[in-house]
Amino acid sequence: MNLESRLPHGIALPPGRMITSDEGDGDVQPLWLSEAPAAIELWPRLRAEHATSGLWPLLLDALDRHDADFRPWGCGELWPERMSSPADHNPDTLFARWWQDYTATDDDQLTADERLAVTAPFGQTWPGPAPTPAPSTDPDEIAEQYAGAFLTQNPHARLGLVAASRGADALATVGWMGPANYDNDTATFAAVVRDWEDRFGARVVGIGFSTLHLSVAAPPARIEDALAVAAEHFAFCPDNIWQGTHADLASYAEDLMGLNCWEFWWD
C-alpha cells in the first residue's frame, strides 16, 4: 500500500501533494507535503490517527522559508533509497564511536586541553548511557503541547506525512539528510531517536533542513543525570555544543533539567 492511498479520509487535509525523491526512477514518493503552513490543530489529530493510518505527521521547516522550493521538502531533496534500517544499528555502539571521534585531538580547531574542557567531567572514553528516568507524563500529551509551541515559533512550517511505524523511523523513511556532514545514513540517528523514544518518552515533532525537534516526556531531573544526557546529545550532535550558546557540557546540562523539548542543529 503506497503512502497516498493511506491518507486519512476522516480528517480534512489542506491542499498538498506527493513529493518524489531526487534519486531513483521517479517512482519513490516518501512524503505528502501541504502547500500552505500547517494548521495548529492538525498535528495532534493526525498523531492520534497514526495507529490506524500508519502515517507519522511532521512539522516541516525549510532552509529558506521564502524560497518557492521549500528545500529540502518541496523539491524532493530526499534520499530514502540510501538509508539503511534503524533496526540495523545499536545506539550504545553509535554513541561510543561518535564520542571517540568528536573528542579526538587531531585537528586544528581546539587544543587537546580545550577539547577535553568542553566534554568535562568526562574524558575521551565514552561514559555510557544516561539513566532511564521513571515515566511521569504522557508522551503524546507533551508532544501535542510542543507541536503547538513549535508552530507558534515557526508559523511557516508545513505539514508532512510519512509512512512509518514510529517518529524515529520517519527520519530515515523520508530520506532526510540533515546530519549528512557527519553521517549520510540518517538511520544511525534514527536508531538513537528510537532509543530516546523508549527511554525518555521522546517524540519526533518537527524537522528543518538540518534541524531536529523532539518533545520529551521524561527529561532528567538531577544534574548528574542531565550531565549524562548532555553527553549523549554531544555524541549525537556535537554542533549543539561546538556552535551553540554553551561553552561545555556542564552548562548545557543545566538547561536540560526539566526541559520537555530537545532541539538539534548540524552545521
Image (cartoon, rainbow, N blue to C red):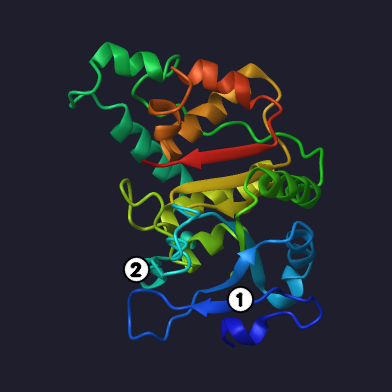
Front label number (2 vs 1): 1
Residue 148: image x %, image y %?
74, 49
Q: Residue at x 23, y 23 (%)?
A: 109
Quarter of the image for residue 187 reads: bottom left
- Viewed as shown, does residue 92 lie left or right of 262? left
Specify whether residue 162 is in view.
Answer: no
> So how many labels did they put on this image?
2
Kind of residue indicated by mark 2:
Arg
**Residue 209 seen in the figure:** yes
Q: Is residue 227 above or below residue 56?
A: above
Name the residue located 55 percent from the left edge and 49 percent from the top edge.
Answer: 193
- The amino acid type of the residue labelled 1 equals Gly
Q: Quadrant of residue 38?
A: bottom right
- Please state the horizontal and vertical placement of residue 90, each as a whole percent of the image: 45, 51
Residue hosting label 1 = 16
Name the secondary structure under disc 2.
helix
Q: Secondary structure at mark 1?
A: strand
Q: Position of residue 215 (x, y in %)?
A: 67, 44
Quickly name the residue at label 2. Answer: 82
Alpha carbon distance from label 2 to label 1: 25 Å
Could you say which is closer to the camera, residue 97 or residue 9? 9
